[in-house]
Image (cartoon, grey):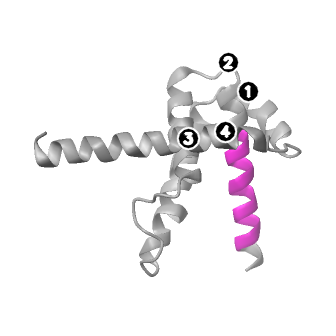
Amino acid sequence: MKKLKVWAKKLKQQLVMLHLAYKDKRTPWYAKVLIFVIIAYALSPVDLIPDFIPIIGYLDDLILLPIGIYFAVRLIPEKVKAECSTKAKDYKWNKKNNWLIEGIIIFFWVLIVLWIFRGYFKI
């Protein structure tokens, strides 16, 4: 159980590091796109596999998220990665901007649902 808590804390710190790298101007645009998708998925209430399905429901959080983080971290320049990792240890989230982030995430999922329905129903 202790290892799981340490792993979860490290994962959270990596998400913060990605958030900081996203805001850095030295991060390439393609890395920012992947970082946005990862953070949106991590914060989103919508999962590819719903969590209420036993065991399988948590696989997306336990497998897809770490894989996405791994690839995003590899796309970030080393200097930016080092600086953002240091800042992430003491970072405090600005909760005033959460409504904006949540709105963007909801908008993103609405677009996906509309795209799926459009393709399915040939609208």
In three-dimensional space, the C-alpha distance between marks 2 and 1, rounded to whole angstroms, equals 7 Å
Question: Residue furthest toward the top?
Answer: 25
In three-dimensional space, the C-alpha distance between marks 3 and 2, rounded to whole angstroms, equals 26 Å
Q: Amino acid at mark 3?
A: Gly
Task: Return the residue at label 4.
Answer: 18
In three-dimensional space, the C-alpha distance between marks 4 and 3, rounded to whole angstroms, equals 20 Å
Quadrant in which residue 3 is drawn: bottom right
Q: Secondary structure at mark 1?
A: helix
Residues drawn in magenta: 4-17
In three-dimensional space, the C-alpha distance between marks 4 and 2, rounded to whole angstroms, equals 13 Å
Q: Is residue 31 magenta?
A: no
Q: Residue at x 40, y 65 (%)?
A: 49
Mark nearer the N terminus (4 vs 3): 4
Q: Is residue 10 magenta?
A: yes
Q: Residue at x 45, y 82 (%)?
A: 54
Quadrant in which residue 20 is drawn: top right
Task: Return the residue at label 1.
Answer: 80
